[in-house]
Image (spheres, rainbow, N blue to C red):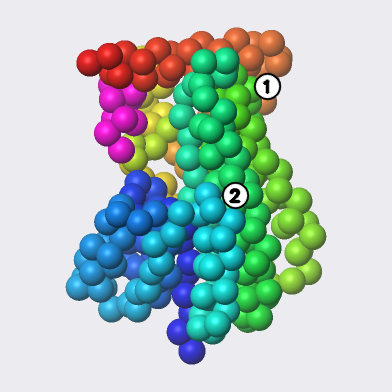
């Protein structure tokens, strides 16, 4: 029987890299992404280059009904999902008092509610397989607090702690859960522009999505619990654990302010 990896947010950025890296490993794919983001074209590209099955749904997962539709489609068509990659999410750098609430509502709906609905709705499908994996995409920001990422950081912290808690709950089952906490990833033109404006140290922590996706899949299949891609990011994480909280807070304030100012600089171009 064929086994599928289901990837949300699969048409662009890290999600697209997850799809291609999984196809390289011979995994059959079930891809989910927003309408009009190039998903049919990506599926055609993968089919023409890899000997794998590919199916897809174009859905806005900010909608509760879309999450219900996805779960129902998988179950009614008996897709043997053995690997779930919860990648869909939305971020950004915002001054809390200046931004419309709808921006934060969308973050919460997609980064938390849709993530929980899909994981909960498909867990029985995963548990019915001989061996199954869930890879949840969090962020390095989950370990720290800082300005301009207050809601986004909180959603990524939620993903991080939820993943570790559910892993303990399922430790005696054959479903393994791992959480990915990358630093910056060059996923789109905005990230490239931000990276250009950053200092050298911050630039060095930015990673290519192909590297992050390939490493994350490999480490998850090896049943690692927490994945921090990039030697520099791992070094920063280990070093920061030794620092007093007020120093970490100051460093994050400086870094996030630098990113916020960079974003505003190219918005004015």
Q: 73 left or right of 168?
A: left
Q: Tag count in the figure?
A: 2
Q: Is residue 173 above or below residue 17?
A: below
Residue sitting nearer the eye, 268 or 100: 100
The answer to whether residue 47 of the structure is visible from this angle is yes
Residue 250 spot, x, y in % from top left: 60, 10
Residue sitting nearer the eye, 130 or 68: 68
Of tags 2 and 1, the one toward the viewer is 2
Number of residues whose C-alpha sits closer than 10 Å to that of mark 2, classed few (under 14), some (14–19) or many (20 or more): many
Residue occupying the point 25% across, 73% down: 47
Magenta stretch bounds: 188-196
Which residue does the numbered mark 2 point to in the structure image? 179
State the image quarter where residue 135 is shown. bottom right
Query: Quadrant of the image for the C terminus?
Result: top left
Question: Does label 2 or label 1 sit earlier along the sequence?
Answer: 2
Q: 257 left or right of 14?
A: right
């Amino acid at each position: 029987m064929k086994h599928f990896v289901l990837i949300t947010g699969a048409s662009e950025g890290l999600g697209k890299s997850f799809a291609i890296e999984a196809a390289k490993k011979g995994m059959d794919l079930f891809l989910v992404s927003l309408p009009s983001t190039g998903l049919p074209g990506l599926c055609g590209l993968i089919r023409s280059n890899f000997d794998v099955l590919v199916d897809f749904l174009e859905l806005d997962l900010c909608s509760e009904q879309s999450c219900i539709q996805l779960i129902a489609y998988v179950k009614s068509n008996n897709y043997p999902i053995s690997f779930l990659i919860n990648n869909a999410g939305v971020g950004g750098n915002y001054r809390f008092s200046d931004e419309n609430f709808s921006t934060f509502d969308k973050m919460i709906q997609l980064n938390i509610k849709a993530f929980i609905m899909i994981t909960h709705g498909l867990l029985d499908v995963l548990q019915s397989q001989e061996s199954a994996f869930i890879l949840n995409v969090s962020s390095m920001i989950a370990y720290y607090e800082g300005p301009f990422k207050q809601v986004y950081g909180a959603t990524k912290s939620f993903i991080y702690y939820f993943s570790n808690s559910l892993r303990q709950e399922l430790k005696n089952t054959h479903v393994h859960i791992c959480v990915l906490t990358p630093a910056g990833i060059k996923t789109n033109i905005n990230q490239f522009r931000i990276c250009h404006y950053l200092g050298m140290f911050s630039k060095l922590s930015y990673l290519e999505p192909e590297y992050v996706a390939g490493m994350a899949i490999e480490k998850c299949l090896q049943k690692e619990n927490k994945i921090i891609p990039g030697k520099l990011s791992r070094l920063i994480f280990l070093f920061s654990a030794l620092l007093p909280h007020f120093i970490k807070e100051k460093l994050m304030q400086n870094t996030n302010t630098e990113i916020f100012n960079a974003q505003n600089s190219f918005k004015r171009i």
